[in-house]
Amino acid sequence: NTILGRMQTTSVCSRCGGEGRIITQKCSTCYGEGIVQGSEIVTINIPAGVSEGMQLSLSGQGNAARRGGVNGDLIIVIQEEPHPDFVRDGKNIYYNLYLSIPEAALGGSIDIPTLDGKAKIKIDPGTQPGKILRLRGKGLPDVNGYGHGDLLVAINVWIPKNLTREERKMIEKFIDSPNFTPAPDQSEKSFFQRIRNLFEQR
């Protein structure tokens, strides 16, 4: 009793810690906690199309709970390793294709890598650097199963840095040739415009 009347208070038992039981003979390994520190290897299934930062959860595979409680979950955070050939952008992937000057000028068929093997693409005569070729459905699968992205092939023309005397003489013959003088058509879009349109189509 107090001057304000009768009051009741509650507190945690100092012996059992509020658990309602007292362990008199504690385990020499866990000391009565019911858990021991350790680790194990688990096997998980990675869905096709997962991306950087995505999280997967395994129920009950996390830290064990004290004295028979509910175990926590194991959270797996996806990290992507850089690919030697491709750059990822969502479901789409990019590949830089380097052509020699004769290949770009004459055109032809070239094998390029894809995620499921080689693919043959056609190079039109006079192909300009910066052109983007799209291989539909050759990208990554959607993680929710809604189709595949595209493989975008960016054309680059390799300019030789070191020429032999004979090679230099051969190229010098074309300096004054009209076909080797830059004359872009007004209807041709710039490289940056093509890149912008490419992103607008996604």
Image (tube, rainbow, N blue to C red):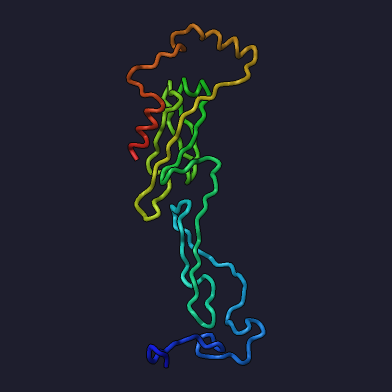
Side of 151 where 17 appears, left or right: right
Task: Point out residue 78 in the picture as x, y percentages from the top left corner.
Answer: 50, 55
| Residue 124 to residue 93: above or below | above
Residue depicted at x 43% and y 52%: 49
Q: Quadrant of the C terminus?
A: top left
Residue depicted at x 38% and y 88%: 4
How many labels were placed on the picture? 0
| Residue 70 to residue 122: above or below | below
Q: Nearer the viewer, residue 167 or 96?
A: 96
Task: Point out residue 163 in the picture as x, y percentages from the top left corner.
Answer: 62, 17
Farthest-out residue, front: 3
Farthest-out residue, right: 28
Task: Point out residue 105 in the picture as x, y percentages from the top left corner.
Answer: 47, 20
| Residue 52 to residue 70: above or below | above
Residue depicted at x 64% and y 86%: 27
Task: Point out residue 165 in the picture as x, y percentages from the top left corner.
Answer: 64, 12
**Quadrant housing residue 15:** bottom right
Q: Quadrant of the N terminus?
A: bottom left
Residue depicted at x 52% and y 88%: 13
Q: Nearer the viewer, residue 129 or 191?
A: 191
Q: Nearer the viewer, residue 90 or 167?
A: 90
| Residue 109 to residue 164: above or below | below
Side of 46 where 142 appears, left or right: left
Side of 170 where 124 appears, left or right: left
